[in-house]
Amino acid sequence: MFKKITALLLAIAVFTGCVGISEVASAKEFKTQSSPVVDSKNKVELKSNKEKRVAPIVARIIVSAAGYAVKKLGKKVADDVWPVVKRKLDDLLEKAEDISIKGPGGGERVFAIFDKNKEIFRLDAKLLKKPDGYYLWVHYHITPDMSEHHDIAEIYMGKNKPAGW
């Protein structure tokens, strides 16, 4: 729960402009302070060391993923797509042990997330030319079958080919 809250707060801060993506994603190390938690019986307990260690890593992955989405797709498209991606990442990152992220590639990839150097999630965007104009087909791949496409959206981009595609 602590990991999800931390990641969500950072992602919200980035998307509302309170914190720049580059400031968060490029930070060398996040430090968490040992904060006591008071339960219903007023007993004080400290959060586990693992929880304090993992939450900042998950938060950095979420913020980096958000940054890559904005960079490759643009803010408007990323805002439409992000809620679906965020739900998938929350479930996936909760189970991950040794996570890392890779940004946009030369092709469709917006970002890919790895656990123990094995790809577990990839967000892709492909530009499609149809008779009425260009569309951006946004989809993801997730373990166990990384070859299967899971559609998120097909977004009309206009009659002219968008810059950068």
Image: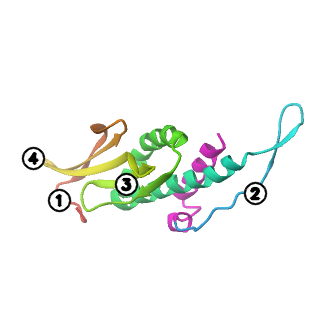
Q: Which residue is mark 2?
A: 33
In the image shown, does 1 or 113 lie closer to the viewer?
113
Q: Which residue is mark 1?
A: 160
- In the image, residue 132 lies at what x, y percent? 13, 47
Query: Which residue is the extreme one toward the top?
Result: 41
What residue sits 85% from the left and 31% below the top?
Answer: 40
- In the image, residue 78 lies at what x, y percent? 40, 52
Residue type at numbered disc 1: Asn
Mark 4–mark 3 distance (CA, rounded to whole Å): 29 Å
Residue type at numbered disc 4: Pro
Compared to residue 112, the image places residue 142 above or below, namely above
Mark 2 or mark 1: which is in front?
Answer: 2
What residue sits 90% from the left and 36% below the top?
Answer: 42
Query: Which residue is the extreme one toward the left?
Result: 131
Q: Which residue is mark 4?
A: 131
Main SS, magenta residues: helix
- In the image, residue 146 lies at what x, y percent? 31, 40
Confirm or deny contact between disc 4 and disc 2 (CB under 8 A). Answer: no
Residue type at numbered disc 3: Phe
**Labelled disc at residue 111:** 3
- Residue 91 magenta-highlighted: no
Corner quadrant of residue 44: top right
Mark 4 or mark 3: which is in front?
Answer: 3
Residue 85 shown left or right of residue 34 in the figure: left
The earlier-in-sequence mark between 4 and 1 is 4
The earlier-in-sequence mark between 3 and 2 is 2
Mark 4 or mark 2: which is in front?
Answer: 2
Mark 4–mark 2 distance (CA, rounded to whole Å): 56 Å
